[in-house]
Structure formats: C-alpha cells, structure tokens
Image (cartoon, rainbow, N blue to C red):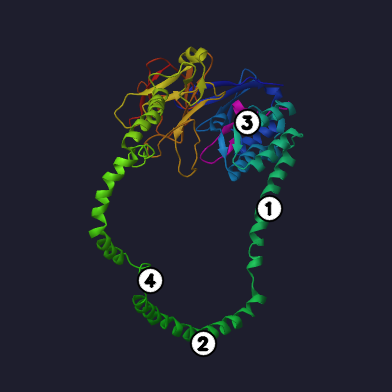
Amino acid sequence: MSYILQSKSDLSSGVTLVVRMPEMDVDKKALYTILADSPNFILPFRYKTVDGDIELTYQVGARNNLKYYHGVRNAKDYVSLWTNVLSPFLECGDWFMKPFSFVLQTSYLYFDRNTGSISYVYIPSINNHSDNSQLNQMIAEISKICSSDNHELEIMVLRSIMEGFNPKEFLKMLRSYQKPESSQTPAAPEPVYHATPATPQPPQQLQQPQHLQQQQPVLHQPVIQPDPIQTSHASGASDDIVINLHGEKPKSKEKPKGGLFGAKPEKKETPKQAAQPKQAAQPKPKGGGLFAKKNAEPKEAKPLIMGAAAEPLYSSPVPLPPEEIPYNDGTVLGDNEATVVEEATAKLRLVSTVQLPREIIINKNLGRPFIIGRFDMAIGRQQSDFEFDRTTKAVSRQHCAIEYNGRSYLILDLSSTAGTFLNGQKIQPNIPYELTFGIRVSFGTAGADYVFEG
C-alpha cells in the first residue's frame, strides 16, 4: 500500500515531509522502538493524531538528495556509498522494521556530505510500502548517478546488479573485494625476511674490500704513470712531421708561401678564364647564384606565403566557416542547429568587481541537475559541473543546483555554508526557486554575484 508524501517548508524548521495514514495501519511496535532509539539511517520524525489518523512529519535538515552528489568516487568512497545504501536492509530488524516499509525512491534518498551517511524515509506501517521491483529500479538509478575511478570494481557492481540483485550477496561481494587488499599487506613483509641469506653475505662483503684494497694501490700506480707518458707523446709529436693533425698554425704558415706568388697570378688568370669560357660560365649558377636564387626563391616562396596567409583565415573568429559553429562546451553543431543553441543557452553573467569567471554557461541537456561548486584540493578532481577556483571565498564544494523543468530554470541551495541569495534574500536549502531573467544570484557573501540570463 502506498502513502502520499507531501513536502512542506518552514522558516524555523526548514524542509519537512508529511505523510498521513490510518491509525489502524500503524506498526506500533516499530514506531515506539524507533522513537526510543532512532537509527541514523532514517530521517528523524515526530507524529501526532489528527482525526483518527497518524500524521508523521520527517525533518530533512542539512541533508540533500543523493542525485545532487553525482560524480566519480574512488574505490573507498564507492564501497562506502553502497554499504550505507544497503546496510539498512540488513540492520532494520533490530528496530522491528521491515525492508519494504522504506520509501525506495531516489527522490527520497538523502545524503549527508559531512558524515557520508544515507537516510531513508521509513513509514511504520503493517503494510508494505514498496516491493522488490522498486528496489531494483532504485539501485539501477544509483549506479547511473555514481561511478568509480576503479573500473574493475564498477564492473563487478554492475554485473551483480544485472545478474539478480541481492543486498546480502552484494555486500558480501564488496567485502570480498576489500580482502585482497588486506591480504596483500601482511604478504609484503614475507619477502623482507633475509635471515638465511644474510649470513653468507657479510663474509663476502668482508672479503671483497680486502681484495679491493690490495688492488687499489696497484691500480693507482699505473694511473699516475700514463700522465707523463702522455706528455712525452706530446713532446714527441713536435719532432714528427705529422703536425697538421693537431694544429692549424702550420696551415697559416703555408698560406704566405703560396699567397705571395700564387695569389697574384690567380688574379691575372681569372680575367683570362672569364674571357675564354663564357659559354662554360652558364653552368656556373653556383657561384653566380645571386641571380639564379633570387629568381628561384620567389617561385617557391609564393605558394608558401599564400599558404601561411590562408591559415589565419580559418583560425580567425571573424570569417568562421559557415558549416561549423563551435558551441561553448567544445561540441560542434551544424548550421541548422545554431538557432537551437541560442534558444537553449542560459548563463549567469558576473556583475561584481571581484576577479571571477565572467560567465557560467548552464547546460540543461545533462539529464540531471547542473551543479555549481568549488574545486576541492583534498579530492583532487572535479566534482561539480562548474567549479570556482579553490581560493574562492564563501563558496561550498557543492553549493547549489540548477534544474530545467521544461518551462523554466529552478535553483536549489545544497545546504551551503554561506548560503545562496536571490536579489539579496537568502533562500532556504533544498527548496527550488524559479530563476527569472535579470534576477541577481549570489553565491555566498564574498562578491560572487551574477545575473541570470536565460
């Protein structure tokens, strides 16, 4: 039997969920046990009698819906998430609770980012509120929202979900995945023990330095001897005629020998040779290439100049090719889709003097909320769709979410520390507010002020 949950908000109590059911359907044993010792995996609630019915009021508090905390998790956080999601089904019997009295919908599954715990809405009724099909659907949706950087672990989880999900077997599989890591740690010191091989090593190390010390003086003596030998070879090389191998000074001495008499007749011979082989001067474009290279270079340079001039035409944003129009997120859309992009684009434009990104482009085609937050160095990877710099003040790691409901954009504060403001008024966490054109959106109180345009 299903019961209708209604969401309410109050400035003093925040967001609450209210459900009413006949008093005769209440599981009083579970109700009184929960009120006496409330487990941490359900939303705290209070009840009262109204016209013969029991009205239960659940307090959401600083918790947020799990769908706003999508992203890639490491293996430890990924296993912790699934453990917190499924452990209540195995532990609820201690409070006389039943697994199918949980509201098994991701829209009523809340995540506390401070503790990492998962909280359910539990309806203490003698009738089941959910069934096995709703459990499988919720688990499948969680697997799409949250992923892991450990692909082997993620494949094991998805395979277990597809082959017939069982919470008990699923948690056993996660524990078995963690066991190899614990078994490897004690196995590491085993090869470190070198008790037996350590005994033969010290005598070898003692004998080696003794031999080395005897050989070292023998080796140092010939090292000193080759130095004078090399100097003797250098002195002997001066007596030999083969001096051209080491110096260029003798070459300079040979130049005046032929340069005094040989250089002048060369000048007399050059005009004679220039007069006789005039026809042979044509194959001399090497020395006379001053004219040949100038005529050849422009022929080869003209296509290069045209090609270099053509490259900026395509790289310049002014004469952009008509067949491709770049979109703000890096994708390329065709000519026919250009108008669609303009209609679907919504953005936040900076209006303060603080050095922050001038625009925040909102992508509504993600199939999920668009998350705005701040980069966290502890995690070391992006967790939100748009992230301010880690030094940005008064902006939380997951600050707010923007959704598109088919008609307009809605903004929801994710229990941020400094809060989210619309036209200077702080909005309540977990309550969606409509964004209208020109409305001022402030993330915190440190100057992250933007105007919505969409």
Q: Is label 1 in a helix, a strand or a loop?
A: helix
Q: CA distance from mark 4 to mark 3?
A: 83 Å
* Marks 2 and 4 in Cβ contact (< 8 Å): no
| Residue at horizontal 54 percent and vertical 86 percent from the top | 210
Q: Quick check: 262 above or below 440?
A: below
* Circle 4 or circle 3, nearest the eye: 4
Q: Which residue position is annotated with label 4?
A: 242
Q: Nearer the viewer, residue 426 or 60?
A: 426
Q: CA distance from mark 1 to mark 4?
A: 75 Å
**Earlier sequence position, callout 1 versus callout 3:** 3
**Earlier sequence position, callout 2 versus callout 4:** 2
Q: Is label 2 in a helix, a strand or a loop?
A: helix
Q: CA distance from mark 1 to mark 2?
A: 53 Å
Q: Amino acid at mark 3?
A: Lys
Q: Which residue position is annotated with label 1?
A: 180
| Residue at horizontal 60 percent and vertical 44 percent from the top | 75
Magenta extent: 106-127
